[in-house]
Image (cartoon, rainbow, N blue to C red):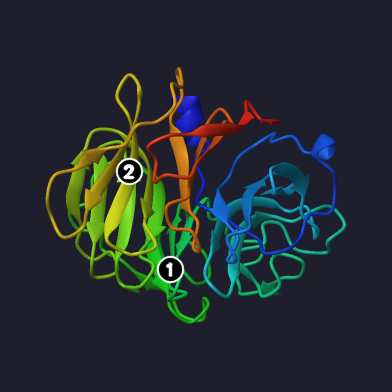
């Protein structure tokens, strides 16, 4: 399980149409999961570009096949960090970049050759970007949690008071630019002041976090001898367990929600299984298993 957790990255999406056949598409790695803004497709970023699930079929998206380590989306933009595709002419690592056309072309936002953010999240309606930086760079004076609301021109470092454990995932609230969640081996934590102070909302090893697009609940993927998925109301109340498929020695690495049909959800696991639910997580159907498209 440690090896699986070490590969965790944040949710990602592109908005472009597919450019290859399902026969060309294998999920060699899964670095994120998201629906397109129009709700018509699911996107999986990885080492070799973006895989697309649309109309019941898998394909590869057009654009450069970057190694997307950190990958997050909003209504308007795609944000990413990682390593450039061969021949792209970009510096490795490429720091923070933004795409206005669904990943076909990219605008550099700084820290090229310095930063590779594996943990990166963005608010769906706010464009607030949160990252965990494992090392200092020209815009970040020390390792830690940072956020920006101006596309990386200025970064603010969070004190992260109350946060415990090694970070595994970060999530940004869709509507509140100062609300962020972090999953760690000690639990799941939420901050409402851009990471200055965190409060625990779930105990035990947490490996993924996701705010639903209504902004009312936090979904937490956990592992305690077996995989779990929990839905927690931000306004208080009891945590609700969510039924998930039987997955052995694996866990829910990513959670995504369709912005058009809100009852439609997707999850992806560390072992490259991807499941789709049309009823809010009550039932699931596999659309990829161990990276093989179905």
Q: Position of residue 85 (x, y in %)?
A: 79, 54
Count neighbours of disc 1 (C-alpha within 10 A) and say few if under 14, some if 14 to 19, many if 20 or more.
many
Distance of label 2 from label 1 (alpha carbons): 17 Å
Q: Which mark is residue 8?
A: none
Residue in the picture at 84% in, 54% down: 19
Residue in the picture at 51% in, 81% down: 153
The residue at which mark 1 appears reads as 123
The residue at which mark 2 appears reads as 220
Q: With 218 as the anchor, is 89 left or right in this view?
A: right
Q: Give the camera-side residue of 76 and 193.
A: 76
Q: Residue reaching furthest front?
A: 279
Quadrant where the C terminus sits is top right
Write down the quadrant of residue 281 in the picture: top left
Residue in the picture at 37% in, 37% down: 282
Residue 85, visible in the rendered structure:
yes
Instruction: Provide the secondary structure element on which disc 2 rests.
Output: strand
Instruction: Reply above or below: 207 against 259.
Output: above
Write down the quadrant of residue 94 in the picture: bottom right
Residue 96, visible in the rendered structure:
no
Q: Position of residue 283 (x, y in %)?
A: 43, 34
Q: With 161 as the anchor, is 156 left or right in this view?
A: right
């Amino acid at each position: 399980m440690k090896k699986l957790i070490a590969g965790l990255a944040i949710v990602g999406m592109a908005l472009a149409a597919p450019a290859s056949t399902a026969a060309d598409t294998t999920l060699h790695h899964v670095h994120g999961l998201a629906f397109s803004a129009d709700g018509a497709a699911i996107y999986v970023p990885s080492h070799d570009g973006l895989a697309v699930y649309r109309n019941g079929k898998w394909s590869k998206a057009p654009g450069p096949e970057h190694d997307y380590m950190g990958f997050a989306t909003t209504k308007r933009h795609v944000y990413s960090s990682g390593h450039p595709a061969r021949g792209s002419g970009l510096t490795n690592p490429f720091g923070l970049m933004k795409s206005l056309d669904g990943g076909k072309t990219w605008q550099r936002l700084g820290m090229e050759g310095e930063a590779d953010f594996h943990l990166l999240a963005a608010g769906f309606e706010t464009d607030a970007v949160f990252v965990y930086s494992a090392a200092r760079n020209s815009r970040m004076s020390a390792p830690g949690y940072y956020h920006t609301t101006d596309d990386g021109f200025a970064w603010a470092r969070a004190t992260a008071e109350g946060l415990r454990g090694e970070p595994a995932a970060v999530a940004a609230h869709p509507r509140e630019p100062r609300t962020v969640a972090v999953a760690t081996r000690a639990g799941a934590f939420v901050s409402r002041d851009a990471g200055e102070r965190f409060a625990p909302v779930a105990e035990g090893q947490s490996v993924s976090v996701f705010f639903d697009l209504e902004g009312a609940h936090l979904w937490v993927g956990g592992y305690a001898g077996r995989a779990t998925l929990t839905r927690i109301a931000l306004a208080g109340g009891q945590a609700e367990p969510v039924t998930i498929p039987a997955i052995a020695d694996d866990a829910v690495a990513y959670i995504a929600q369709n912005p058009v049909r809100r009852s439609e959800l997707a999850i992806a696991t560390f072992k490259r299984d991807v499941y789709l639910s049309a009823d809010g997580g009550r039932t699931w159907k596999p659309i990829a298993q161990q990276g093989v498209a179905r």
